[in-house]
Image: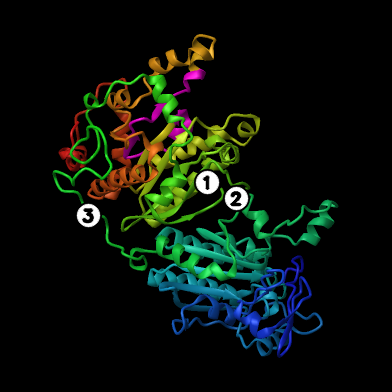
Amino acid sequence: MTGSAPLATTAREGPDWTLCPACRALIFTARLRRDLWVCPDCARHLPMTAQRWLDVLFDPGSVRQADIAVADTDPLGFTDALPYPRRREDARRRTGLTEAAVVVSGTVEGAPVVAAVMDFGFMGGSMGAAVGDLVAGAAALALRERTPLLLVTCSGGARMQEGALSLMQLARTSEAMGRLDAAGILTVCLVTDPTFGGVAASFATLGDVIVAEPGARLGFAGPRVIEQTIRQPLPAGFQTAEFLHGRGLIDLVCPRGRLRPALRRILTLGGPPSARRNPRPLPAAGPAGPAAPHGAAGPAGVDGLVTDPAELPERDPWHSVRLARDIARPGVADFAARAFADFQELHGDRLAKDCPAITGGLARLGRTTVMLIGTRKGHTAAELAAHNFGMASPAGYRKVARLLRLAAKLGVPVVTIVDTPGAHPGIEAEQDGQAFAIADCLRRMARLPVPVVSVIVGEGGSGGALALSVADRVLMFADAVYSVISPEGCAAILWNSAAQAPRAAAALRVGARDLLRLGVVDAVIPEPPGGTQADHQAAADLLRDAVTRQLAELARVPRADLPALRAERFRRFSTLPPQPATAMTVAAAAPAAGRRG
């Protein structure tokens, strides 16, 4: 081991009773086994052996051990109190394992997976060349079988008895994870206590989704080493799963008893089509399109969407602004619950923070897995404050970029829900590179090789909204607004008075009718009687049907053509005369020919 990481605090286990290392309670071992080795008194998640993890996570009878050859090595002829080969043999005799990791394939609630499961009992779960063989071998097996990879980590770090050879395993296992990234194979890391050193600095933190058990510690250096270095006490809960989750470094803190359904949801949503439930693509809409969705009100095109501005009523723009800001209107959380299924939220920018104004994760729309991303406000004063009024920080846009990368890797469409007054202004946001983060989202969305559909459901404010709206199709609800600047901001600049906001709203042409005429949006979703705020379920039905139809049309377009077509869509807003249509443009427009507009 590295020597810098703390040892796991293990339970003292007898034939009938086990002593909890946290609360010192004496627990009947049969009960502890039934409770998945979680203390019933203090909820401490006790360390488990690799075999116990296989028993807890996998479907009975599904586990098959992988045939991955490993060889013993002693490159340094290392001896401390014992020669290295003797210490390794003692670990084998004590654990019954060949090395500190076990590689298997099997199913988790029916979802196929390849897994590498570490065991702290084998030399502190330290990573030497043999563990590198096993983790790289697990990645190769997942690649060969086109199956998601699950890594269950528990380690003190690199194995010091193998010196620099152990250090090389960080690069080796990271490269193996990179090959899965390039191939579009989902990787999931389950962090258990403790995971430190070289394992934390390589494959344990490279998963597409990182789940941790409550209280699990994850870090490069151990807390004792850090305290000795900085000569200051560490914050409470430092390096625990909860601490890291709050800083955007892991996606999910999940109690052991809920791991199986959580992992099943992640594996089926993010795995290759063969691993997902109901993997068939959405059916394409017919030339005339299906009947208008239930609950639609007002004029609509043949597919339930309005594409002719003349069919929209003229409305006072300032009235539209006030309607769009109604806090009772449904937002991304409401639509995730009502229009989508199996939503698995993913957290954090993987740098330092998790912006509460951005919600995103994998979900199911009908029979198709999508990446759902949206700006989040809330419906009460407390919720608005908790989500920063829907104004994302640089960490929020970095989280968006991370989710876009994952969508591209998995080949799943992106659906964005936009309701924001704009990006968060302020000194900290500028210091953290707000402009850089937004620009990265714009560039990444423009080149995304999967379909993108954006829906403006309330406010679409400035670059903060555009960062989620560089899409193949941009829709908006009839009472939503979309503008380069807020009416109040425009009024303050042009007329030195925010009281002139109604005048500014009219000048900015923020409403659906004008935006559809200008081509800023492709279609308008009619609202239920009383607006979306009056009937969240009807609004969700309308959004689901509209997005489903758009994705069905976009499914006919070759994926390789999407970035160029997206660029051409935005090129329409040039002051230069339009270029002659290319064959690709004509082909892409064909699916929409049945719509009005």
Q: Does dot 3 land on a helix, a strand or a loop? A: loop
Q: Is residue 426 above or below residue 186?
A: above
The answer to whether residue 199 is left or right of residue 3 is left
The answer to whether residue 178 is left or right of residue 473 is right
The reply to whether callout 2 and callout 1 are in contact (CB within 8 Å) is yes
Q: Amino acid at mark 3?
A: Pro
Q: Is residue 480 magenta?
A: yes
Q: In the rendered view of the protein, which quadrant contains the N terminus?
A: bottom right
According to the picture, the residue beneath numbered tag 2 turns out to be 248
According to the picture, the residue beneath numbered tag 1 turns out to be 399
Q: Does dot 1 land on a helix, a strand or a loop? A: helix
- Answer few, some or many: residues within 10 Å of disc 1's Cα (few below 14, many 20 plus, some between 14 and 19): many
For marks 1 and 3, give the one nearer the viewer. 3
- Looking at this view, is 539 or 511 the one in front? 539
Q: Is residue 219 magenta?
A: no
According to the picture, the residue beneath numbered tag 3 turns out to be 283
Q: Does dot 2 land on a helix, a strand or a loop? A: loop
Residue 481 picture location, percent across and down: 39, 28
Residue 110 picture location, percent across and down: 40, 74
Q: CA distance from mark 2 to mark 1?
A: 9 Å
